[in-house]
Amino acid sequence: MADMHTHSDLTRVKGIGIKKKTALARLGINSLKDMLFHYPRGYADKSNRRRVHEVAEGDAATLSGIVKSIQTTRSNGGRVMTRFQMLEDMTPFELLFFNAAYLEKQYSAGETLTAFGQVHKSGRQVTLIHPEIFRESDQLEQQLVIMPLYPLTEGITQRDMAALIREALDTVLPELEETLPESVLRRHRMPGLKASLRELHFPTDRARYKAAKYRLVFEELWSLQLNLALLRVDAKRGKGIAFRTEHVLDHYMRVLPFRLTEAQHSAIMDIYTDMSKDKVMYRLLQGDVGSGKTAVAFAAMALAARNGYQSVLMAPTELLAAQHFEAMKRLFPESVDRMALLTSASKHKKKLREGMSGGATDWIIGTHALLEEEVVFDRLGLVITDEQHRFGVRQRNRLEEKGLSPDVLIMTATPIPRTLSLVLYGDVDVSLLRELPAGRKPIETIYVQKKQFQRLCLKVDQLIETGRQAYMVCPLVEDSEGSAGLQSAQSLFEDLRSGAFRHRRVGLVHGKMKSSEKNQVMTAFADGHLDLLVSTTVIEVGINVPNASVMVVMDCDRFGLSQLHQLRGRVGRGEHASYCYLVADRPGEVAKQRIKKMVETQDGFEIADWDLKLRGPGEFFGTRQHGLPPLKLADLSRHLDILALCQKEVVDLLQRENTKQLEQDEIELLRRRRHEVFESFSI
């Protein structure tokens, strides 16, 4: 296999055909290099031989004995079972295999065998279920070692995986380039990449294994921080616009129909201070649902306009963009002629784009349509992205690049635990809005068992009778195989409009609908033409209906804490008392904890911290959606100290690059990493 290399087709490896190649692809393995980074989920210590009387139920154990007899039988259910009756001295035990009658021909009574497998105990009877078996002639010292246990898929066994890993270690590991600077390895006394990978897959020593795992955890967090830093670095380097701030905030506060909260006022002051400097602003505005981020964003746009610069606010949905646009027109009626709304549904797009490129418009709101190449700005001075994590860093960068070092404000309604904030935004300045505007009433949150749903429908109908509107959110779009017991939006919509709510105006919206259809239904609800909106989580972001005061979440145990909090935030936006009903059948222990936390608190930041603890970082946002690379070994809740260390190292590396103080290997490493980030890093 001397001609094998890191990206060779897997079918060139002995024993791998199309079927196994397809199975490996399900595990994200498409090359021998991928095999190296398919880490074990645990280890089996075959070297620790046990006595029969020492083992307990569920143990993975190595036992030795003489074969007394071998017998194959068929169970009532048709399963073929082969049993080896064994003796360890005078103590009996048993080896049990399923659908392996061929073993009866391979082994015979009187042989001494060593077996490794999982223990099942029934009274004094000890059985090893489907164990690996070895003869005395099988060079046991090489076989009975600590063995890795890998995540598998149908068609791939542990033996297959171990053989493939050994193949990868022997053939392509030597090709791997070191991914950490030599200076970092020396400073933290860490082993190199090749030695670490070999030790993690096939440990030889506890101390060496711990050092290897530490280095690979460090590697993941360091790489993550460096990738994100490189994606941010251009915006940080440029010389920014020094905006003049005199009297702008005073004028803005006079036109507002409400008083700013202290948190809003503080955030605006942070932003104005940043924008007054000739250094590019890069600030994250993190606010709980309903905390008034839009008012802060408009204050920043007003400052840009007063200085003769254009500002753009990019929203995740057409409906939210349209709602922002209408609110902006009401707030600044004297500037309506200089405002533009650009979405995929906009009419006269050519005229709108001409207004932007010619400088006739300087208050601009839109969606992904703003990223199109044809969209060019005259003097873009401020870029604001709303619900930034739905766009991804690369998309946002494309918008920023349309201006000459514009200031950047990122807004998110997802309270982010400090841990994840460090990962996603690094050294970005943060303003928090933890205070709700005056007049906002707390939302009463109530858990309801599924069997009480009809009674809940009566309660919701009574609230609709008083003039309010309601949402009902389901985890599925339609009924499907494997979803028994889960409520789908389609079936609930049909049941309600022909049953409990047949006298009401009921709408349906879900992610499989065309964008134009979704907007039509959601606009009808926002305008008060529907009483009840049955939906999937597409309404989690992007609709603001002050008259909606009831949120019902079906099968709430299928949602994460932060997602439940976001859904609850769709109500409680007006002057009326609001309710959130969490409906579930028989929630598990973790789901019960989520429901309890939702009932107890409405603090999104506290909820976010709990969600991180309960679900882990990989599920917090959904890594695919937000471009957060998966962490295979690192755990953000346990490795915060390593994360802080990695950030310090990355900042130091980039600072030394600016002052041309890098070693040659660091220069090469950064060159490779920049290429990887901008060519293939999916974010």
Image: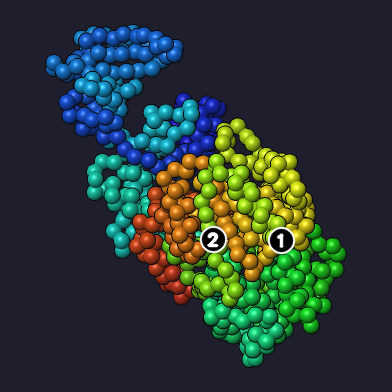
Q: Are marks 2 and 1 in contact (CB under 8 Å)?
A: no
Residue on which the image places disc 1: 467
626 and 568: which is toward the camera:
568
Given the image, on which type of amino acid does mark 2 rest? Glu
404 and 461: which is toward the camera:
461
Considering the numbered disc 2 on the image, is that residue within a helix, a strand or a loop? strand
Total of numbered circles in the picture? 2
Residue 379 visible to an observer of this rendering: no
Residue lying at 53% horizontally and 57% vertically, measured from the top left:
445
308, above or below 87, in the image: below
Residue lying at 64% horizontally and 49% vertically, measured from the top left:
458
Q: As drawn, is 175 to the left or to the right of 22?
A: left
Q: Quadrant of the N terminus?
A: top left
Given the image, on which type of amino acid does mark 1 rest? Gly
User: What colour scheme has been applied to the protein in the rendered image?
Assistant: rainbow
The 10 Å Cα crowd at callout 1, few under 14, some 14 to 19, many 20 or more, is: few
**Viewer-nearest of discs 2 and 1:** 1
Q: Position of residue 677 (x, y in %)?
A: 55, 57
155 and 458: which is toward the camera:
458
Q: Quadrant of the C terminus?
A: bottom right
Q: As drawn, is 529 to the left or to the right of 3?
A: right
Residue 525: image quadrant is bottom right
Residue on which the image places disc 2: 444
| Mark identifier at residue 404 | none
Residue lying at 64% horizontally and 75% vertically, measured from the top left:
295
The 10 Å Cα crowd at callout 2, few under 14, some 14 to 19, many 20 or more, is: some
Residue 174 visible to an observer of this rendering: yes
Considering the numbered disc 1 on the image, is that residue within a helix, a strand or a loop? loop
